[in-house]
Amino acid sequence: MAKKTNEPKLDFKTDWAYEPAPEDTSHISLKKKYDLFIDGKFVKPNSKKYFATYNPATDEKLADIAEADAKDVDKAVKAARKAFTKWSKISAKERGKYIYRIARLMQERAREFAVIETMDGGKPIRESRDIDVPLAANHFFYYAGWADKLEYAFPNRNPKPIGVAGQIIPWNFPLLMAAWKIAPALATGNTVVLKPAETTSLTALKLAELIRDSGLPDGVVNIVTGAGATGAAIVNHPDINKIAFTGSTDVGKLIQKAIAGTDKKLTLELGGKAANIIFEDAPLDQAIEGIVNGIFFNQGHVCCAGSRLFVQESVADIVIRKLKDRMETLIVGNPLDKNTDIGAINSKEQLLKINKYLKIGKEEGAELYQSSCTIPTKGNFCRPTLFLNASQSHRVVQEEIFGPVLTVQTFRTIEEVIEKANNIPYGLSAGVWTDKGSKIFNLTSKLRAGVVWANTYNKFDPTSPFGGYKESGFGREGGLHGLMPYLRF
Ligand code: NAP
Ligand code: MG
């Protein structure tokens, strides 16, 4: 279905310190300029303003992206409102068919999505190819299946769609977060105005092209690009019925204040600072892989990253030695190379934030350890980092860094580690590594976290609900639970 365009092929020059054969990008056609996707068409922004999106691994400009203002958002909401009257009334089976079609088209174009995701956001191609894109397609498949089964999901409750959903997503899993938002909204008969993050709009705009090609009725999904002000215009629009936000706790709080007193529904998926707990009876080699995946997957730009390591004192020396050895084998570099383990930090701004925390951690007295790997001289990169001998009161332990930085603390008793793991403003996820099932059950009931992984980490599936406690937000996405925020009963 991919349309031939006359757009120039991207000239992807690289200058890597580490130079293996990178993914071929010659087949990827990017436009020079991307407009707003409103009412089934690409339209120019009211302000005529565009902003640039960059490849964070090379600092090269990839394209210009339209900046939507309040007038554009209003146009998108009006299109979504008009579409809602029809979309909410077509048969549920028909609705499901459209969503299946989106899922299938995404599978057909998976390679293109993966390469663009990696170029625009900096994540390793192995991750975009094997995790982000397949999971995004699976999300559409899964919710397509629910479309005509809502009566069974909520028997005798007569579920009805809410109306127009305003959805705002972050830059760490751009396509996947779009899928998490759009799929359940469509399955339940709502229409959508979605805003991707400023640094990673390209796959959302590719998704807009796919949605147009899928024949989904005009206005059911509208995608408006821009920065925080565009997001705020969605939040404040009087004709939006529901806001679904994934992003930082700070912005989440602003949104909660902004809609107080309105009848807009709200779900917030916010930050995290997860404890990854290793007991002395854990399968240690497996746990090391879990620690590495927990904090270095997607450069640590993961809300549920296992960013606080707790190791039982009796095995602390051996775990830290094995962890350091494993870190030496991690390849940091060209995200388009299939061998890369850690790609580019998503933006200059985020790299500055991470570096600020590296300084704070040292000043606080934690011991900084970094792998000795070389990193490319161009672009935004950070070595995999540990803060050893970290204390509960350190800012690097309490605050979300959102980078490849792991704090390491030790513990003696189960009570002590539960107390420390919970003593934090966040409550999104946790990991537990032990040979004993009873310990796992004990911890899963006592850790205040939305997801607790046992002897594994970062396992995602469309069937299981995901969401936080405390300052990590409220509401669940995924699974049957993920339908509820888009329904009224
Ligand atoms: P962010 O700064 O809060 O931005 C999130 C989104 O909100 C972006 O699209 C952003 O636009 C927009 N935005 C900014 N200011 C706004 C405002 N005043 N009103 C409405 N929208 C506004 O977060 P981020 O830095 O992109 O993402 C990282 C954060 O997301 C981390 O804290 C991470 O833990 C969290 N996260 C949570 C989950 C979860 O499921 N709990 C999943 C992924 C990420 P611009 O980017 O264009 O400015
Ligand atoms: Mg970019």
Image (tube, rainbow, N blue to C red):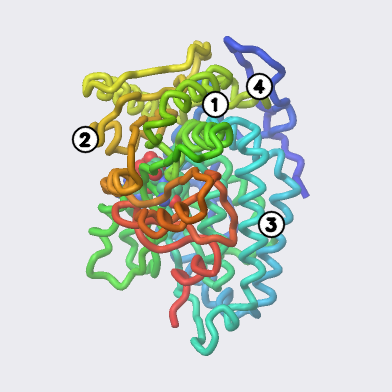
Write the residue at 61% across / 57% down.
Answer: 139
Res. 347 visible in picture: yes
Res. 63 visible in picture: no
Instruction: Please state which amino acid type lies under the numbered disc 4.
Output: Asp
Residue linked to disc 3: 103
**Which residue occupies the foreground of this view, 116 or 464?**
464
Label 4: which secondary element? loop
* Residue 375's disc number: none
The answer to which quarter of the image holds residue 350 is top left
Mark closest to the chain's N terminus, 4 or 3: 4
Label 1: which secondary element? loop
Which residue is at the far bottom? Answer: 156
The answer to which quarter of the image holds residue 313 is top left
- Give the spatial CA distance, label 3 vs label 1: 27 Å
Residue linked to disc 4: 11
Relative to residue 80, is residue 438 depicted above or below? Answer: above
Can you tell which of label 3 and label 2 is closer to the viewer? 2
Instruction: Please state which amino acid type lies under the numbered disc 3.
Output: Ala
